[in-house]
Image (cartoon, grey):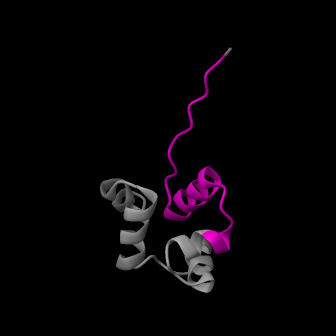
Amino acid sequence: KSIYTIKPPATFDGLLEMKMYELKLNQGEMAKKLKISNAKFSLVLSGKQKPDIPLLKAVQEKLGVDGNYLLSVL
């Protein structure tokens, strides 16, 4: 048996995708959990829009992501 380690994502959109996979949520459900519109979540996920402070705060509080890690992937 071998053990595989998975490195944490190096980008914000990678972090969101990983959390969606872990929580088994689709894009609409994740946007609802973070209390943002589907359109805004889609833009952030595709990299067309940078996350704003309220979104970063929601990711930290609702998904339990460390604030220092969040700043490192921006």
Q: How many marks?
A: 0
Q: Position of residue 43 (x, y in %)?
A: 59, 80
**Which residue lies at the image location 42% right of the left edge and 75% below the top edge?**
55
| Residue 13: image location, x then y, percent | 55, 64
Question: Could you say which quadrant of the image residue 23 lies in?
Answer: bottom right
**Where does the magenta region start and end?**
2-29
**Vertical order, 10 against 28 (above or below):** above
Q: Nearer the viewer, residue 29 or 45?
A: 29
Q: Which residue lies furthest to the top in this view?
A: 1
Q: Position of residue 45 (x, y in %)?
A: 59, 71
Residue 1, placed above or below residue 50: above
Q: Which quarter of the rendered picture does the N terminus lie within?
A: top right
Residue appearing at x 62%, y 85% in the figure: 39
Classify 16 as above or below 40. above
Q: Position of residue 6 (x, y in %)?
A: 57, 37
Magenta stretch: residue 73 in it?
Answer: no
Query: Based on the displayed image, in which of its 4 quarters is residue 41 positioned?
Result: bottom right
- Can the viewer see residue 29? yes
- Quadrant placement of the C terminus: bottom left
23 and 73: which one is in front? Answer: 23
**Residue drawn at (61%, 22%), measured in percent from left and top?**
3
Q: Is residue 9 left or right of residue 54?
A: right
Q: Can residue 47 be spotted in the picture?
A: no
Residue that appears at 36% across and 70% down: 57
Q: Is residue 36 left or right of residue 57?
A: right
The residue nearer to you, when weighing 27 against 2, is 27
Looking at the image, the residue that sits furthest to the left is: 68
56 lies left or right of 39:
left
Residue 9, magenta (yes or no): yes
